[in-house]
Image (tube, rainbow, N blue to C red):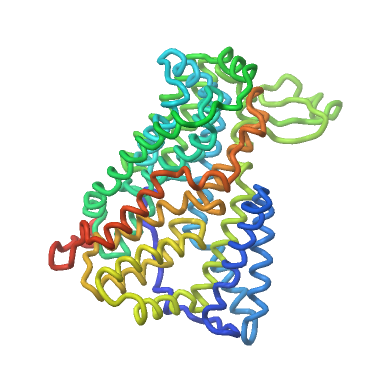
Amino acid sequence: MNQPATTGPDPASQTTIEFRGGKALSALPIVFFIAWAIFQSGILAIGDTAGLIAGMLIGLVIGMLFVKGPWKSYADAIFEGMSQPVAVTAIVAWLWAGMFSATLQVGGFVDGLGWLAQVTGVGPTLFPAITFILAGLLATGIGTGYGTTIAFVALFFPAGVALGADPVLMLGAILSGAVFGDNLAPVSDTTIVSAVTQDSDVGGVVASRFKYAITAAILSLIAYVIAASMAPESNVSASARELFEETSNPAGLLHLLSMGTVIFTAIAGRHIIEAISWGLIVAIVINVVFGLAPGSDMLVFNVPEGSWAAETFAGWPLIATAESASVGGSIYDGAFGFVTLSVLILLVIAGAQIMIRGGGFQALQDFLLRSVAKTVRSAEVTMVTVTAGINAAVTINTAAEIAIAPYIAKIGKKFNINGYRRANILDANTSALGYIFPWSGGVLVAFTQMNELVGIYPWFTQEMVVSPVAAWPWVFHGWLLVFIFLFAAITGFGREYTSDRISKGASTI
C-alpha cells in the first residue's frame, strides 16, 4: 500500500501454545471457519458477513477447548492477531475507498459512464473486458486491489449491469483487474512483501513477473469477450434499462479528474491514504462547484422533527429534519458499510495467529521438507500448492503471504531457487486466490459494496447482486495466474537458480 510492509519474525520462532492432539490442532479455528463459510455461502447460499463473524467466533472458542494448560496464551494470540498492521492497513484502505467511491456515486459518475457507453456504442459484450482493463490499470497505479474492487463495484458494476452485461462476468472482470494490479504494481503491499521476504529488490521482481502477468491478462481479456458473447441475455428489466439511459449525464465524467488525482498521487509515491484523500477532496469540490450534488448528499446531520436542534439549526446547509436522529451522506455511508467486514477480517487474522503460535505452520514446513520437496520440480510444485492452500484459509492475501513467506524461502533456498522466482511464485498465488474463494477478503468486500447499491439507484435491485459463491469460476486472471505458475513449476519454464542471477536485495526498495 505504497509503503514497505513489516514481515515480522519467523513464525516458527513463536510456538508458545500447546494443543491436545499436536500442532495440527492449531489450525482448527481456521478450518472450522472455512467449513462454516462453505456451508453458509455455498450450500445455503446465505451471503451474510455477520454470519461469517459468528462462524469465526465459534471456531476460536472451539479451538480454545483443545489448549493444554492456561488459556491466557491463546487469548493473547487472538489479541496479537487482531492488532497486526496488515489487518489494520486493509481496513483503513476499505474505509477510505468506500468514502471516495460513494462520493463519486452521488456525483453521478455512473450516469456519466452510461452516457459514454451509449455514445461510443459499447454494449454488454465488450463492457466486462473493458472493465477488466481499466480495473487492472487502476489497481496497478494505486497499488491496492481492495480499493480498486470497491471503486469499480460501486461505479462500473451497476453501469455494466444496466447496459445488459452479465452481472457475474462483471464481478469476475473487476476481481481479475484487482488481481492484476495486486500482482504487478510496484507499490502493492503483496509485491513489496514478496520481494522483501525473498531477499529481492522490488524492481527486479516486477520485471521478472511481467511475462507471467501479461500472458494471463491477454488470455483473460479474450476469455471475457468470448464469455460475454455466449452469456444469456441479461435479466435486467426493460424499464430499469430505460431509466438508467434516461438518467445518463455526461457531467458525471468530470469525476475522471477525481480518479486521475488518486492515480497520479499514488504513482508519485505518496501513501495510498493520502492519494485517496486528495481524490476525495477533488470529488467533493467538483460535486459542489458544478452542482452535481449538494453538500448534504455527502454529509448530513438528521435531527428529529420538532426538536430543539431542528428549530435552532433550521436552514443550515448540512442539517436536515427526520423522524429520528442520525448521520448520513456518502462519507458516512461509504465508510460505515465496511464495519462488519472489518470485524470479520480481524477475527480471521486472529485465527491465523493461533495457527502460527500453535506451530501449525512449522509442522507444515517440516512435513513438506521431509516428505514432499525431494527435487527442484517437486519443491516448486509444493511452493505453488502450499501458498494456494494457505490463501484458502487466510482471507487477507497479504497476511497469508507473510505467514507462508518464511517457509517458501527455506524450501527455495534448499534447492538454490532464485529469489525472484520464489517471490513470483509466492505473490502470484496470494494475489490471485485472495479474490476467488467466496470467503476471501476481495470477494467479501465486493459483495458488501454491491449490497450498498440497492437503494442508491432506482433501477438497481437485489436480484442484480451476485452471491460470493457464484463469482469464483469467472475470475479468469486469478485462475490463469495460478495455472501458469503450476505449469512453470512442472515444466521448468522461467526457472532461475541463485547462480543464474543475483538479486539486488531487499534494501534497494
Look at the image and tell me whether residue 233 can be seen.
Answer: yes
Quadrant location of residue 402? bottom left
Please, is residue 305 above or below residue 58 in the view?
above
Q: What residue sits 26% from the left and 74% below the top?
A: 375
Residue at 41% across / 56% down in the picture? 430
420 is higher (above) or lower (below) than 143: below
Q: Residue at x 17, y 67 (%)?
A: 498
**Any part of residue 266 in sight:** no
Relative horizontal placement of residue 334, taking residue 135 as reference (left or right): right
Residue 401 in picture, x, y percent from top left: 41, 61
Q: Position of residue 495 (x, y in %)?
A: 21, 61
Residue at the far bottom: name it: 69
At x 35%, y 82%, the residue is: 370
Compared to residue 144, the image places residue 402 above or below, namely: below
Which quadrant holds residue 387? bottom left
Is 50 left or right of 393, judged from the image as shown?
Answer: right
